[in-house]
């Protein structure tokens, strides 16, 4: 579903150049959930934005569903690919009702039967029809993220890009959203490309993952490798240990490597 070859993204010019992504290559299979994990500034979200068409100054090649994509994307591209952003409040128009937020993509793409589609999308994210005419400020964080997921689903895409979809939510709500996303993938057979700094989220959601550091791909591992603690690279091992929380042995292992 995704094939990236030698992707590079550079911000700034001359002495202020920052190489955000440095020659990354990876493949994501149809129906797979693939995670990009790493510390802040590792380049994982930049890769996601390049795939989504939100960055137009990248080098290398990107193919989606077997077709090369350029720096400018067609309307058909957004029927195939949709994105769920990190902040569910910032990604929803504060003065639009849920009904308008979900109807707008249908209008843009010329799809009819909007009311039935909106109701179906709300059902998919386990929100009832009573939410249709509420505004974002009348919803909890988890409910807003469900609306954002419904907006991504309403065009029936085959690829969904997830940028830290639970990091802005309360811990008590995060598991609900992750389980919802799991259910959606199982029911619809969509492909996920998930960005997270949390290895626990990636372990729960992803079949495979790529570990990123300073714009480069460190290693690609399976969910089984992660569960068995069988990551090969020292940085990946440190990231896995750090995800377990503060521990004196963990701190000592950082200073020893």
Image (tube, rainbow, N blue to C red):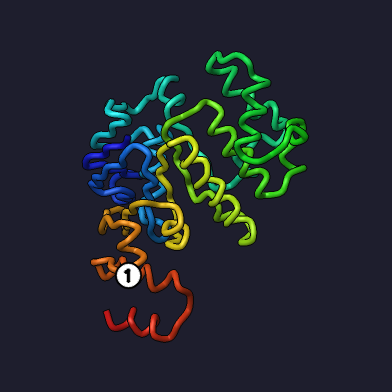
Drawn side of residue 75 relative to residue 223, left or right: right
The relative height of residue 146 versus residue 65 in the rendered view (above or below) is: below
Drawn side of residue 43 relative to residue 5, left or right: right
The relative height of residue 206 versus residue 76 in the rendered view (above or below) is: below
All told, the count of numbered labels is 1
The relative height of residue 169 versus residue 129 in the rendered view (above or below) is: below
Compare residues 170 and 20 and report the one nearer the observer.
Answer: 170
Residue 17 visible: no
Residue 92: image location, x then y, percent: 63, 37
The N terminus: image quadrant: top left
The C terminus: image quadrant: bottom left
Question: At 42% across and 62% down in the image, what residue appears?
Answer: 199
Residue 74 visible: yes
Residue 162: image location, x then y, percent: 47, 44
Residue 197: image location, x then y, percent: 44, 59
Residue 67: image location, x then y, percent: 28, 25
Q: Quadrant of residue 80?
A: top left
Question: At 22% across and 39% down in the image, what residue appears?
Answer: 5
Give the residue pinned by disc 1. 229
Q: Quadrant of residue 234?
A: bottom left
- Seen from this angle, which residue lies furthest front? 187
Question: At 52% across and 44% down in the image, what residue appears?
Answer: 183
Question: At 37% across and 69% down in the image, what residue appears?
Answer: 240
């Amino acid at each position: 579903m995704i094939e990236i070859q030698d992707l590079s993204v550079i911000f700034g010019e001359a002495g202020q150049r920052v190489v955000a992504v440095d020659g990354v290559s990876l493949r994501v299979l149809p129906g797979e959930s693939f995670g990009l994990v790493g510390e802040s500034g590792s380049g994982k979200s930049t890769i996601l934005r390049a795939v989504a068409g939100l960055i137009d100054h990248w080098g290398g090649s990107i193919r989606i569903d077997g077709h090369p994509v350029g720096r400018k994307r067609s309307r058909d591209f957004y029927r195939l690919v949709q994105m769920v952003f990190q902040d569910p409040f910032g990604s929803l128009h504060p003065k639009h009702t849920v009904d308008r937020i979900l109807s707008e993509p249908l209008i843009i793409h010329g799809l009819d039967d909007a009311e039935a589609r909106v109701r179906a999308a709300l059902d998919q994210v386990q929100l009832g029809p009573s939410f249709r005419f509420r505004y974002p400020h009348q919803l909890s964080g988890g409910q807003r993220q469900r609306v954002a997921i419904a907006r991504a689903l309403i065009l029936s895409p085959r690829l969904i890009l997830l940028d830290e979809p639970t990091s802005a939510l309360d811990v008590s709500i995060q598991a609900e959203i992750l389980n919802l996303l799991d259910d959606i993938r199982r029911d619809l057979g969509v492909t996920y490309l998930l960005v997270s700094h949390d290895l626990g989220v990636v372990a729960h959601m992803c079949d495979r993952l790529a570990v990123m550091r300073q714009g480069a791909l460190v290693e690609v591992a399976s969910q089984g490798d992660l569960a068995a603690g069988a990551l090969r690279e020292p940085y990946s091992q440190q990231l896995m240990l750090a995800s377990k929380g503060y521990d004196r042995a963990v701190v000592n292992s950082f200073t020893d490597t």
